[in-house]
Image (cartoon, coloured by chain):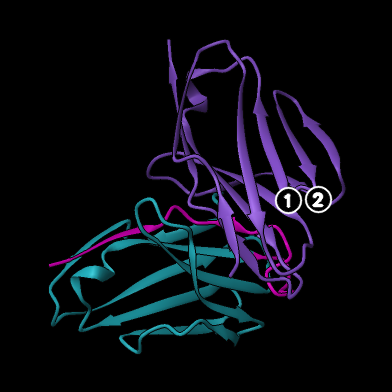
Amino acid sequence: ETGVTQTPRHLVMGMTNKKSLKCEQHLGHNAMYWYKQSAKKPLELMFVYSLEERVENNSVPSRFSPECPNSSHLFLHLHTLQPEDSALYLCASSQDFSGGAETQYFGPGTRLLVL
Amino acid sequence: GQNIDQPTEMTATEGAIVQINCTYQTSGFNGLFWYQQHAGEAPTFLSYNVLDGLEEKGRFSSFLSRSKGYSYLLLKELQMKDSASYLCAVRDSNYQLIWGAGTKLIIKP
């Protein structure tokens, strides 16, 4: 069974749309992460949840809204996005959170295109 | 500021050896990771170095020199399936992961 799954794998949305990205981990981990990956740029950490509580928010615009209902699921709610938000959005999990110290296991990502 | 430098792209031949370098300038050091990412897929963990020296794991080895702020990933007996991006990430003194932009490795027959 795949450790970390993400849906949808591809998403095209207009700037006025509202959509949500979903991530699920089957590894029994306590920490989950959202990253943004743009072409030829380093991974950008967006949000971190540990035991369902947000522990980090790296100055992400409010048009991105995370939700962690339990330790296995993580959502990223999107609204009124801009074309520059087009990127690959990766979810990851780790056993625990120590500032990102543990090995992280990534999902395949959602390729987002904002028109 | 904190910075991780890796070559953007490298090309190598099937069966050969390739070395992917990573240099870093971070506020402190608490370990270095290498991840592999095939196009359209998730990054997967390859190696972790926290002490100086070489860590060998099958065809892949990773080297670290903390005094030089330098690491490399060595891939031997290259196979076509090794075509991927290789991401270097450093854990700083606050245990934050700082990521490089990745090196795209192209393997030719």
Q: Which residue has dot 1 on it? A: B69
Q: Which residues are magenta?
A: A94-115
Determine which quarter of the picture holds residue A98. bottom right
The secondary structure making up most of the magenta span is loop
Q: Amino acid at mark 1?
A: Gly
Give the residue displayed 49% in from the left and 56% down from the top: A107
Label 1 vs label 2: CA separation?
5 Å
Q: Residue A91 versus residue B54: which sits nearer the camera?
A: B54
Q: Are marks 1 and 2 in contact (CB under 8 Å)?
A: yes
Give the residue displayed 77% in from the left and 62% down from the top: B29
Disc 2 secondary structure class: loop
Q: Which residue has dot 2 on it? A: B66
Can see residue A3? Answer: no
Say which colour chain B has.
purple
Q: Residue A94 versus residue B10: which sits nearer the camera?
A: B10
| B107 horizontally vs A2: left or right | left
Query: Tag 2: Cα neighbours inside 10 Å, few (<14), some, or many (≥20)?
Result: some
Disc 1 secondary structure class: loop
Q: Is residue B91 above or below residue A14?
A: above
Give yes or no for residue A96 being in the magenta stretch.
yes
Say which colour chain A has.
cyan
Give yes or no for residue A36 being in the magenta stretch.
no
Residue B9 position within the rendered picture, expressed as x and y whole percent measured from the top left? 43, 35
* Chain letter, disc 1 residue: B
Q: Is residue A33 above or below residue B42?
A: below
Residue B102 position within the rendered picture, expressed as x and y whole percent measured from the top left? 50, 46
